[in-house]
Amino acid sequence: MINMKLYFSAGVIILCLLLVTLTPASGQDEDDYEGPPPNGDGDAGSRDSSGGKSKLSLNQFVRYLESWQRDNSDKYRYMTQLLRQGNPESYKVPYIWLYYNGNLTVSRNEIPKIYFVVENPNSLDLRRTLFVDLQAKLPGEREYHNVNQIPQVVQPFDYVVSGERNITSLKKWPEINSFTQIGGVGEVKLRAYMHDGTRDYYSSGRSNTTHPHYGEMTINITNAPPQLFNATLVGPQSPRYNDPLEYVAEVFDPDDDLMAVRLHITDPAGREVRNETQEAKSGRVSFKAAQYGFFGEADAGKNFTYYYSLDDGIDITSFPPRDNPNATFEGPNIRSTPKLWVENLHVEPVDKNYYYWDEYNFSVVMRNQEPYSIEIPVTLKIKTKDKNWKGVETRTVTVTPDSKRIYFSTDDAFDVLDRGSDFSFRFEYQEYDQNNERSAEMQWYEPLNQRLMKYDLVSIPIGINLLFVLILPLLGGIFLEKWMGKGRLG
Amino acid sequence: MNMMQVSFLAIVMLLLLGLVAHILNVRRVHRRIEMLEHKAVPKEELLSDLYSCQGSNFNALALSAWILFLTALFFLYLLTPELFQDRNYFIQLPRMASSLGGLALFGLLGSVMMILVVVGSEKMPESLQYYRLAELYGYYSMSRNEKRAMIAAIPLLWVSILISTHMATIHPTFWAPEWWAGFTLLFASLSLLIWPMAKEMWEGRS
């Protein structure tokens, strides 16, 4: 019916043009004639023999149009506008809806199936090309913003007739492939924005919609927080500060967001001492200590821990979780810078029989790896089956850059309980040696002698002892008798 | 139970034998006196009447012999770890034992303990005065020869102590005959010391 009206209007306009063209022949003023003069050629037109009317040939009409365009451009433009668009007052507003037939709570990583539908009540010749955007309003925001970058285009011929309605098929924005492009989480309002170069239209203007058609659609978008696995510190067990160390972890974001992976290095008290950030997609991340200069010489001898925090733009998640501030990954325990070189532990008993009462010369070769002398306390300790690293002697020794054997001569290392026992000895010092240890020990290969007493029976000490042992009871008896007088007669 | 433990048990049994003989002797005399008197005789009175001094020299030597006995017992069984692995002198008091005067201190320990026993036994009440070690031999009649024989326990115990000391100086070497010699001397000495009680019990049995 609408098309019929359009055709009728066009026909009336053309008929009017013909009447205007024929007016001179019917007595109109010559000045009103604005078309080209008849040139009498065959195709210009022919007069009707009955009323002097002539038919307007196509060639004539073209020449009319050309001359109007040339001579009266304003009216010609108006006429063409009328021909192309009809009467602006007669243009009807197209309608647009969002179409969504899914769950209204969705994860950001889900593939959105949001479509739109346009109903355009205008006839084909009046329809305009429409440009459609998807717009979102995030929680707390007051304005909508475009989600897609390129508007979807609806051409005048993109409609199908459904009953008396011209509607498009379901259309979507092809570059929107996840809800992450909406750019937020929570309750997000969506609408379609449409414009035809002249006017703007919003789907949100339509309130009487029913599922799955929406004027303004509210969906709850949720975020899946990023995850981290297999955090490891690759490097030596007890590294030096300049050893190659690499913090490696696997990160994964279910929404496939770009993540800010931050490595936090903390001291044993849990205080953060350094942090570095890398942007990464799901996969392996690596922080090389040397590349970032995590550790320096001043860190030698210190123990560090670390943790990660992952930021996907919405959530920040820590690994291990920071609910407990002490929950961290261990390492590295940086070795102290060694100062000492310790070697050749030795023990030399005065008597090769290894009696427990003998004097033993425990010795060790030490030198300072730095070009100066230091004075450090060194402690000799002994381990036997009866003693677990009993301290024997502590002495402050001077360690020079030149190797020097340091002796601990003592007859107090062992006692009678150690006889027959294997033994080890250890030197403890307050600086680190070449093995990053602060002690050096040795298991001696000779057990101690089983002998109980130092002296032979025929010896002065035993003689004196025995004399005492044998005489003392006699003296005791005499003393008791003198004191108590039990044997006196009368 | 090894032989050393048996030997130790034998010494303990011999000591008990002496003690039992002494008790039985006193009771028997008490009973017979009461039978002769046909009346109850207070024990304190009887014991006072029975007691006769054996002489200061003998008494001093007898006490010395008992002190020496305990010292010799300590030396034989507690100086080296043969019998008591974890309860010997060197394990219990290692610092003292391995010191220069370790042996003398060990001897002192044995002597003091026996002196304390003697002094402690003096605290017995009058009715039990026959348990007083210093008065032990006052209830028995002993000839001069018997006294001499009994005092011979002292040199025997000296030799036993010398043997024990020698064994400690050669430890871990252990020569069993030597040890048994030391034990025999100790046992013989104890036998001499309890001889008067045993003899009295034997002779007065009828």
Image (tube, coloured by chain):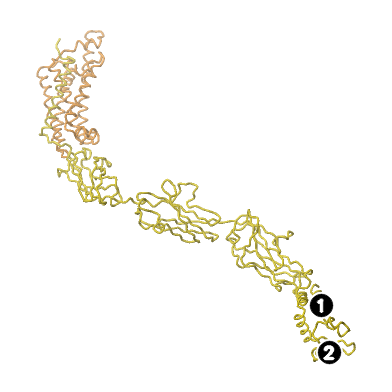
Chain colours: A yellow, B orange
| Rendered position, B14 above or below A291 | above
Visible residue check, residue A383: no
Q: Residue at x 14, y 11 (%)?
A: A489
Q: Return the chain for callout 2.
A: A
Q: Quadrant of residue B66?
A: top left
SS at mark 2 in the image:
strand
Name the residue that disc number 1 marks.
A13
Visible residue check, residue A454: yes
Name the residue that disc number 2 marks.
A46
- The quadrant in which the C terminus of chain A is found is top left
Spot occupied by residue A69 in the image (x, y as percentages of width and height): 75, 80
Q: Quadrant of residue B202?
A: top left
Number of numbered discs overlaid on the protein picture: 2
Q: Amino acid at mark 2?
A: Ser
Give A285 or B118, whichever is nearer the viewer.
A285
Spot occupied by residue B18 in the image (x, y as percentages of width and height): 20, 22
Give the CA separation, mark 1 to mark 2: 22 Å
Packing grade of label 1 (10 A; few <14, some 14-19, many >=20) is some
